[in-house]
Every structure is written in C-alpha cells, then in structure tokens.
Image (cartoon, rainbow, N blue to C red):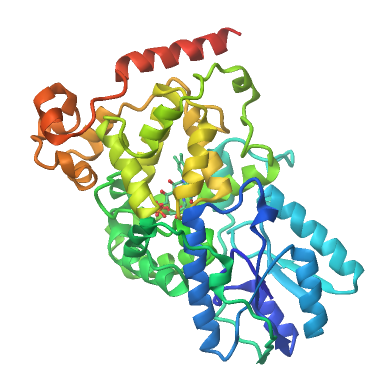
Amino acid sequence: MLFRRDLRLADHPALAAACTAHARVLPVYLHAPHEEAPWEPGAASRWWLHRSLETLRERLSAQGAVLHVARGDDLPTLRALIAASGASAVYWSRRYEPAAIAQDTALKTALRADGVAVHSVPGNLWCEPWQVATAEGQPYRVFTPYWRKLRTQLPVEPPLPAARAREWLLLPDNLPLEALQLLPRIAWAGGLAECWRPGEAGAQELLEVFADDALAGYADGRDLPARHGTSRLSPHLHFGEITPRQILHALQARVERIDARRRPDIEPYLRELGWREFAHHLLYHFPGTPGENFNPRFDAFRWADDDRAALHRWQRGRTGIPLVDAGMRELWHTGWMHNRVRMIVASFLTKNLRQHWLHGARWFWDTLVDADLASNTLGWQWVAGCGADAAPYFRVFNPVTQAAKFDAEGSYLKRWLPELAQAPRELLQQPWKDSGLLARSGYPAPMLDLAQSRQQALAAYQTLRTQ
Ligand SMILES: Cc1cc2nc3c(=O)[nH]c(=O)nc-3n(C[C@H](O)[C@H](O)[C@H](O)COP(=O)(O)OP(=O)(O)OC[C@H]3O[C@@H](n4cnc5c(N)ncnc54)[C@H](O)[C@@H]3O)c2cc1C
C-alpha cells in the first residue's frame, strides 16, 4: 500500500481493498518530490507532511505496523520493495495533478509489465473529475451548472471504518522521517505548530468543533476573517487526512439532530466543497492551467514589469494597506489565510500592482499549509480574471471598503498589525490619513494610491478588450 496524499486509515478505499484482498500488507511512504516538478511541495506543505507522516506512523504502530519510509525515483524504489517483500500487487489512491497522472500512468504500465497487479483507487474526492460532464459529454467551465449536476451525486455510501491488515509486513532499511529533511531550518514553523494539529485525529477534532460551533452560522460567518467561521479543514483535505465523504456524513448526521433553523447553513458549506471538486475537474481537463491562462485572451494582457521590491513588500505584509498586510502576515505566521482575504490580497497583487498572477500563486504555494494545485490555480485565475468562470477583471477589490464591511470592529486588523492596535477605529483601515500615526507606529505609508492604480488596471484591461 503506497501512501501519498491519503495519510489516513479510515475511509480509505485503497487501503481497505489491500487489506481485504491480501493476507499481508506493507504500508509504504515513498518520497519523490522531484517527480511532482515544477510544483514540488513548498515549505509549509513539507512541514505539514512531516507532522502528518509522524501521526500516520503512530496510528499504524498502534496496530503493530511500521510505516516503511523510502526515497528516490518511484519506479526503481518500488521495484526494490516489491523484490524484497515478494508483493504481488500495489495499491494507491488516485492523484489528479498533471505530473502525478503522468507518473502514475508510467508506474502502472511498468509494474504491470513486471507481472505486478496495480490498483489505482479513488478516495480523495467526492466524484471523479470525469464523472461530471455536460449533456454533450464535455467538461464544465462554469461553476453553477457543474454544481447543480454534482449536487445530485452526493456520496450515499457511509465512510469505511479504519482498515486493518490481517498481518502487516515489516522490511529492513526503513528510513527515519528526519532523513527526508522536510522541516524548515529557520524558526518560522513555530507559528504553524501553534495553529495546527496535522493528521487524522486533528482533522476529526476540527470537524467536530466546526459542526458544533461555526456550521450553524456559516452562511454569514464564513465571510468574517476575525472569526473562526469556517472549518479550516483545507490542509487536512489536501493531505487526505479526511475525506469529503466523512465530512458530508458527519454534517448530515449532525444536521438531522439540530434545530431546523440552523439547517440552511449546511448548503453553502457543501457548495464550498463543490468548489474544491470543480477545481479538480478543471485541473484534470485543462492540465496546462497551473502555468497558463485558462482564458487565452489574457495572453495579450499587459502585466506591469516584474517588480521584485513590490512583490517583497506584498509577501511580507508591508504594503501599507492594512487588510492586505494583515492577510499576508496571517499567511506567514499560520500558513493559512481566510478565503475573503485571499481574494483581496490576490486582487491587490494582480490588479493594483498588476503583477502576473503566477507570482502570487508561487508564493501561496510555498507558504500555505493547504497549498493545492487545483484550488490554488482556480483561486488565482479566478481573481486575476483569466480563469474559468472568473470574476470579471474590472472587479477590483477595495481593501478599505472590504475591511469596513467584513472587519467592522477592526479585530482582524489589530490582531495581525500590532503596531496599529492603538489606532482609533476610523483610522485603522486608512492609517495614511494621519501622518503622525504612521510616524508613531512605524507602520509603512501605502506603496500606491488605491484609486489611481485601479484606474491604471482598468485602462490596461481596456486595451486587452480592444485588441
Ligand atoms: C487566490 C486564492 C488561492 C487559493 N489557494 C488555495 C489552495 O492552495 N488550497 C485550498 O485548499 N484552497 C485554496 N483557496 C480556496 C479557499 O480560500 C480555501 O479552500 C479556504 O479558505 C480554506 O479554508 P476552510 O477549510 O476553512 O474553508 P471552508 O469555508 O470551511 O470550506 C470547506 C472546504 O471547501 C473547500 N473550499 C472552500 N472554498 C474553496 C474555493 N474557493 N476553492 C476551492 N476549494 C474551496 C476547501 O477544501 C475547504 O476546506 C484559494 C483561494 C484563493 C482566492
């Protein structure tokens, strides 16, 4: 059983199939990040991976199993493991990124030619990307009709219990996790450790908390960055520590028990899970989109020249625009950012600064614990205006009015911008209105004029339209 981004024992169809069909099972984690190039896991993902593998190893060892850790090119490493164990079959959960599909297809062909059975099993999505299609059998490009179709295909089967092999195989030459060198050398990951508990148990715990607290007010609460109004399950979903099916069943069971007035909130939550599915649908059908505009008309768009200094200020939360800086600092400290703030910082980078969306996508890739090729590509292209079913380019988020609307008390800004914690509420969103406040607090002056840069962005877009 080859574990990759399915780091759990429960509701694991591939593991369950291996344990049912075979008397002895060898659980393996095979580290080959170079085979995911050019999107090898970033620093935050590597931190998460290390911690998640630790917990998977503990869960397995409670059953008397040892997670066999190996590293190297997939095929030769697997062949060596097959030779050493005498395995007759290999099981894994399907992956959907273009490099992973190419890799797994080649592995399957080579292993089958060696006489080894290969089982590539679904399990991390609610629906396989090709199972939802238009009446003409084409992929969807617009979310709402896609969602209408997907919504009718809710998984009805209950989640599987944790799988257990009749006998777990052990092999010598097991690498310690530290040999994979996944943890960052700098002290940066302290913030991540404060905020997250990677692994299956951590995911179930978050699900419980969400179902008890935030689900009831999700429809409104999900837009307020100061609140824990969303599930924060995205990194757990990305690493396959929890499945959409487990979430759906847990929430449905909960909803049936709770007050009817709270029930409508499950629907917007399911819709968000639907966006994750849509992202995978798009990535599967349009595998070039992590690096190319989904809408080729944007190939002619006049981005500003690459501006490393501006990019650096954006990355470090020093733009002088409070809501943008708060979001970027939240990301740096916690490895996560609230969805509304993700849209605002992305709009600032691609529209006010007119930097190519790939600069932002790459920074998110390195710093998000939930960095996911499908969702990150969809999110960046959606905001930049060049994606499938994207926000129109002329929709430029105004961070000042967004802060006034979604962080009216300023709690989110104060949390992430401690130098402005004492600022009067009316200045918190626009501290540049008082030069004395900037001087006293050390908070930077804005790097650009929001209204003027918006006009410049719209003018650049206008030339694209007339071309
Ligand atoms: C520029 C940009 C980049 C993004 N990059 C990523 C990324 O790399 N990885 C990632 O998982 N999400 C990404 N998102 C989507 C979204 O911001 C996160 O999924 C969400 O904030 C995760 O928080 P949550 O688990 O509390 O979400 P909840 O509101 O609790 O939603 C439940 C689940 O639905 C899924 N989901 C919610 N919103 C979206 C969405 N817009 N697109 C796809 N799936 C969604 C997630 O898996 C999430 O865990 C990005 C959004 C933007 C605007």
The residue located at (54%, 50%) in the rendering is 372
The quadrant of the image that shows the C terminus is: top right
Query: Where is residue 178 drawn, in percent x and y?
Result: 53, 71
Q: Vertical placement of 320 versus 146: above or below?
A: above
**Residue in front for this viewpoint, 247 or 315:** 315
Q: Is residue 404 left or right of residue 434?
A: right
Q: What is the tally of numbered marks visible in this picture? A: 0
* Quarter of image, res 427: top left
Q: Vertical placement of 443 versus 37: above or below?
A: above
Query: Where is residue 411 drawn, in percent x and y?
Result: 18, 45
Query: Where is residue 361 drawn, in percent x and y?
Result: 51, 39
Q: Vertical placement of 221 versus 240: above or below?
A: above
Residue 244 visible, this angle:
yes
* Quarter of image, res 161: bottom right
Given the current orientation, which residue lies at the most extreme front position? 185
Q: Is residue 305 left or right of residue 36?
A: left
The residue located at (28%, 54%) in the rendering is 217
The quadrant of the image that shows the N terminus is: bottom right
**Residue in front for this viewpoint, 425 or 255:** 425
The residue located at (59%, 56%) in the rendering is 153
Residue 231 visible, this angle:
no
Query: Where is residue 8 drawn, in percent x and y?
Result: 54, 73
* Quarter of image, res 286: top right
**Residue in front for this viewpoint, 220 or 45:** 45
**Residue in front for this viewpoint, 356 or 409:** 356
